[in-house]
Amino acid sequence: MLQRAFKLTLPIFFGYVPSGIALGLLLAQVGIHWGWAAFYGFIVASGSAQFLGVGFIAARAGFQEVFIATTLLCLRHAFYGLSIRHSLVSRSLWRRLAIMLGLTDELFAVLTHVRPEEFKEEPELGFYMTALIHLYWGGAVTLGALAGEYLPMHWKGLEFVLVAMMTVLALEQYLRVKAPNFLGAALLVGVVCQMYFPEHMLPISMGICALILFTTYQIKALSQAKAVANQRRSDGG
Amino acid sequence: MDKTVLFIMLAVAFGTYITRLVPFVLGERVLDSAPVRYLGSYLPVMILPLMVIFCMRGATTHTEHAAQIVALMVVISVHLLSRMALVSILLGTVTYMVLVN
């Protein structure tokens, strides 16, 4: 079964090793000891949120700010759980919980592609897959941190990796939903908040953006209800 | 290592884990509601640009600011042409490093 789990998670392995090493190198760059980098890599596998965490470490941000930013960035995970229920068939509650907690974007993509019958035949497959990808990630982060510590290369400007990565993620999201108004609004809100509230830029700007979305939804729902009512009236008349 | 760093690491872990438990605590009914779906599909396209701006604030000098703008344009144009994340990130970072050194 371990063999099957490894085969299924092999694409994740090839994705996690370079990006985990990059995270470890970045942590070494901001002065984190490799032991703590390993701790960071093994307590959670959260990809982009952990890269953002490096930015917070460099800025020495507070717990609440980091917590809010991480929650909002990972909010998409809240929609994943419903689609992978077919993999939660292990007899052990702890193992089912481990799959829920270890559900990264990549694991989600792979789990949704495994047929439910396969999980019925091998109830522990999902757990082994989760455990494996967690090990790939933690191991790669540790490796990167060790490399950064013992092959010292203080390359000025490497921190731009973070900006580049977030830009690519934002661009991918934009190409997916094609919402130029929301993108433009977010950029405007972000720049204004950066100018006026540099200390708490993220929580304030994220709150405003969530409010914009919520208001837009309400307006849309209202106009839709009106349209339905008008339709009824004209049908009746 | 100071405590602030440890707290940041824990905040990232807790923040992630909470979002992953949400569907199992709230259940299908709440998550399938229209407003939650709407928020879930458009929030990332607003949050990620904010992250970009947040990550850019490390720059202090004029050279760094100018280099950021140039490198950012490299990332965007390369990514729109190639759609290969690793290539765009690498080329953008190299551009920035060459410009500031």
Image (cartoon, coloured by chain):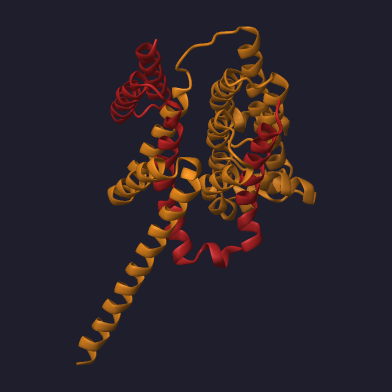
Question: Which of the pair A41/A10 is nearer the observer?
Answer: A41
> In the rendered image, what is the letter of the chain coloured orange?
A
Task: Identify the image quadrant of residue A16.
Answer: top right
What percent of the width, then of the height, locates residue A23? 57, 24
Which residue is most to the bottom?
A237
- Side of B81 where A104 appears, left or right: right
Front residue of this view, candidates B95 and A92: B95
**Which residue sits at x=67%, y=27%?**
A138
Q: Using residue B38 as the reference point, say whether residue A24 is left or right of it.
A: right
The quadrant of the image that shows the C terminus of chain A is: bottom left
Task: Provide the letter of the chain coloured red.
Answer: B
**Toward which corner of the image does residue A12 lie, by quadrant?**
top right
- Residue A21 horizontal/vertical position (percent): 58, 20
Note whether residue B17 is visible. Answer: yes
Image quarter in which the N terminus of chain A is found: top right
Say above or below: A200 vs A223: above
Q: Which residue is painted at 45% across and 40% down in the image?
A: A198
Query: x, y (%) of residue B62?
Result: 33, 22
Residue B99 x/y as whole percent: 35, 14
Residue at the image position 39 percent from the left and 10 percent from the top: B101
Asked where in the image residue A236 lies, by quadrant, the reply is bottom left
The outermost residue toward the front is A196
- Residue at 65% x, 32% y is A133
Q: Is residue A19 left or right of residue B64?
A: right
Whether residue A4 is visible here, answered yes or no, is no
